[in-house]
Image: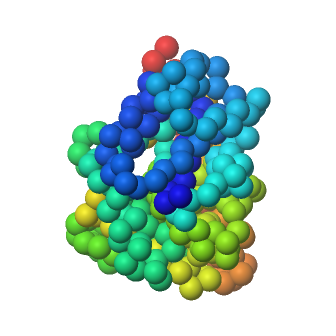
């Protein structure tokens, strides 16, 4: 088995069908795949659509939303591929995406995790597809809007590496869980996704653990996918605001806090709290305006 592909579904609708179609249509038939869909208690007809169109796909049905990390782990525990591909149900693959990354990782055994160039539907780069780990500085620059205003600065644009050519093959700290190819030996060495993260930052945490274990994380722009972004999170937007900020807080506390002073950590936690309040207010204002 070459690649185990895992999609976590929550009311993915037609998007997940489109994603699986693009997977099979754009993967060399000589590459042996097994595909899991882990359904987190969907209430739409997406699971029946998948079963109808793709009878070979393995379905794991959860009665409730188990979260992204736990759902992926369920499939990883049953998987047989020498590579694991975490794939969001709101993505569309371009030709030879999987084939190219498998060949790249076969030729670079020191690479533990690899991600492609991720484009938004309008053709712009999804900035989160290549990142450095969050630091007190990146929190500050992002909160003040400096990382966007001075995106070409190696200091202020460091988190999303926006000062680099998006078409340059680059070793990075983290790639995106929307499409993340992981070597089996890497998972065997660092363990499964941390289920303390319900949603968000579990991909960055996996990359952090892989780098700490000596593996390289690579952004490979020679292949592209399109990310329609947020098909399952729009349903409960307010809850997702909470989950994102909770995960950011936990990632910092777990992985980075020990390297900074108490004052620096306090400032980080204050910025996370302020961002949560502002995001919630912004959401409520937009909701009120729509009414």
- Is residue 169 rendered to the left or right of residue 31? left
Q: Quadrant of residue 103?
A: bottom left
Q: Residue furthest front?
A: 30
Q: Quadrant of residue 171?
A: bottom left
Depth check: give the residue in front, 95 or 65: 95
Q: Identify the residue shown where x is 51% and y is 74%.
A: 112
The residue at the point 73 percent across, 41 percent down is 66
Q: Nearer the viewer, residue 21 or 8?
A: 21
Q: Residue at x 63, y 69 (%)?
A: 187
88 w.r.t. 196: above or below: above
Please state if 100 lies on the left or on the right of 276 as rendered: left
Q: Position of residue 20 (x, y in %)?
A: 43, 37
Camera-side residue of 280 and 208:
208
> Percent from the top left, x then y, of residue 231?
48, 33
Q: Is residue 65 left or right of residue 211?
A: right
Front residue of 179/54: it is 54
Residue appearing at x 54%, y 44% in the figure: 35
Q: Is residue 226 visible?
A: no
């Amino acid at each position: 088995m070459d690649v185990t592909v895992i999609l976590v579904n929550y009311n993915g609708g037609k998007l997940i069908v489109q994603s699986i179609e693009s997977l099979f249509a754009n993967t060399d038939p000589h590459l042996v795949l097994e595909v899991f869909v882990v359904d987190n208690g969907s209430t739409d007809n997406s699971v029946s659509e998948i079963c109808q169109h793709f009878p070979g796909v393995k379905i794991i049905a959860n009665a409730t939303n188990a979260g992204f990390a736990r759902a992926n782990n369920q499939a990883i525990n049953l998987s047989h591929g020498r590579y694991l591909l975490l794939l969001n149900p709101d993505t569309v693959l371009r030709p030879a995406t999987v084939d190219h990354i498998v060949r790249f990782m076969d030729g670079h055994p020191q690479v533990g995790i690899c991600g492609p160039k991720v484009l938004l539907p309008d053709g712009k780069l999804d900035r989160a597809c290549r990142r450095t780990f969050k630091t007190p500085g990146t929190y500050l620059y992002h909160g003040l809007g400096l990382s966007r205003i001075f995106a070409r600065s190696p200091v202020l644009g460091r988190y999303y590496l926006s000062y680099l050519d998006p078409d340059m093959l680059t070793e990075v700290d983290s790639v995106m869980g929307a499409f993340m190819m992981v070597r089996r030996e890497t998972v065997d060495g660092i363990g499964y996704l941390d289920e303390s993260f319900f949603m968000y930052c579990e991909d960055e945490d996996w990359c952090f653990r892989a780098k700490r274990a000596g593996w390289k994380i690579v952004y490979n722009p020679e292949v592209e996918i399109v990310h329609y972004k947020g098909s399952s999170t729009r349903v409960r937007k307010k809850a997702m605001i909470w989950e994102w900020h909770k995960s950011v807080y936990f990632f910092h506390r777990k992985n980075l806090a020990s390297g900074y002073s108490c004052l620096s950590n306090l400032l980080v936690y204050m910025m996370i709290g302020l961002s949560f309040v502002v995001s919630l207010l912004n959401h409520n204002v937009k909701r009120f305006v729509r009414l």
